Amino acid sequence: MVPIVLPTIVSIRSSRSCSANFVASKLSRISRASKDWLAIAAAMDNELAISIFEAMEQVDSVETAEAVADAFCRPLAPYGFTACLITTLPLPHERRWHESIFVNAWPREWYERYNEQGHYRHDPCAAHARRSGDPFFWSDVQASIADEAALVMSEARDFGLRQGICLPVHVPFRPPAAVTVSGERIDLPPGALQLVHALAHHAARSILRMKRRSQEDDTPRLSGREREALQWVGAGKTTWEISRILGISTHTVATHLRNAREKLGTVNITQAVAEALRRREIEF
């Protein structure tokens, strides 16, 4: 996927003032939060909390990854965050890792340097985000890292990204992803990290849904015979039994099933049946 380069994030600070009770009630309405989340909202900066709640609502109403990223970044801009990257996290040896980026709002010079030097292989934040689903500050992973990893963080500082946070997004049956935001000097209010992480999760999952819908729109529909063959596989029939039911050869049944797997992007027939069910190509 070609990265979407956002314009520079503009700092916008609202003059509105809200009570802690209003913050808590809005969080409860939007995310059906637990008492722990309500306590976080009540204790943190009210203005940021309200901005995050509004961003959650905006994420649900927009239709592009760029708009999702803009909604995510806007409430953070007044606190020193000037750069953002939303991406899945392939394994370190993946040479074309940049194709996994959904939204790229890094400084262009840093993005080019990062790729030229192969920094992704040694990025300590990416490595930690693949292993853990908890949010963290960049400084949390710099205590004891290898020289190659230290170089990544040192060069990020040279390009004005001295401080940042990384917000892992781990979704079942999907590769790990992360939202990372950074700047020269960030000043996130106490207690805000978990709520920002919730917004990152909301934003990343929205982008993943957009990507899935786009892929499905581009995926060839199954033919009638391919659907029939998959339907009977799902009912527990063998290739030979399906050939007798449909009045075709076993070779033709195998061809239909192979074509169905390829169209659905699956590696085996069990996955193909599950994917066809999810897309409502077949039903039981």
Image (cartoon, helix red, strand yellow):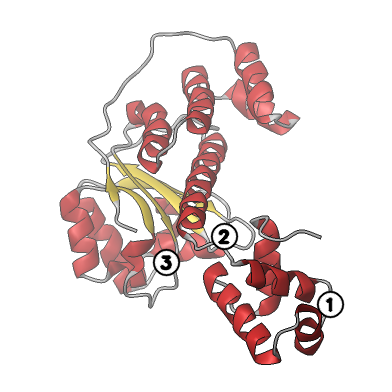
Label 1, secondary structure: give it: loop
Residue type at mark 2: give it.
Ser
Quarter of the image holding residue 76? top left
Residue 20 shows in this picture: yes
Residue type at mark 1: give it.
Gly
For marks 2 and 3, the one nearer the N-term is 2
Residue 159 shows in this picture: no
On the image, the x and y values in percent for residue 210 come to 48, 46
On the image, the x and y values in percent for residue 262 come to 53, 75
Residue at point 75%, 86% (across, down): 239
Which of the numbered marks, if any, corresponds to residue 144? 3
On the image, the x and y values in percent for residue 223 come to 59, 67
Q: State the residue in front, 53 or 143.
A: 53
Query: Which quadrant is home to the N terminus?
Result: bottom left
Residue at the left extreme, as displayed:
109
Is 116 situated above or below 9?
below
Label 3, secondary structure: give it: loop
On the image, the x and y values in percent for residue 176 come to 52, 61
Camera-near label (2 vs 3) is 2
Residue type at mark 3: give it.
Ser
Q: State the residue in front, 222 or 28.
A: 222
Which of the numbered marks, if any, corresponds to residue 132? 2
Which residue is the site of mark 1? 236
Is 6 situated above or below 61?
below
Which of the numbered marks, if any, corresponds to residue 118? none
Q: Is residue 115 left or right of residue 35?
A: left
Is 280 situated above or below 253?
above
Mark 2–mark 3 CB contact (< 8 Å): no
Residue at point 27%, 40% (across, down): 6
Work out how far the residue at label 1 is from the one at label 2, CA to CA, in angstroms: 39 Å
Residue at point 52%, 18% (across, down): 46
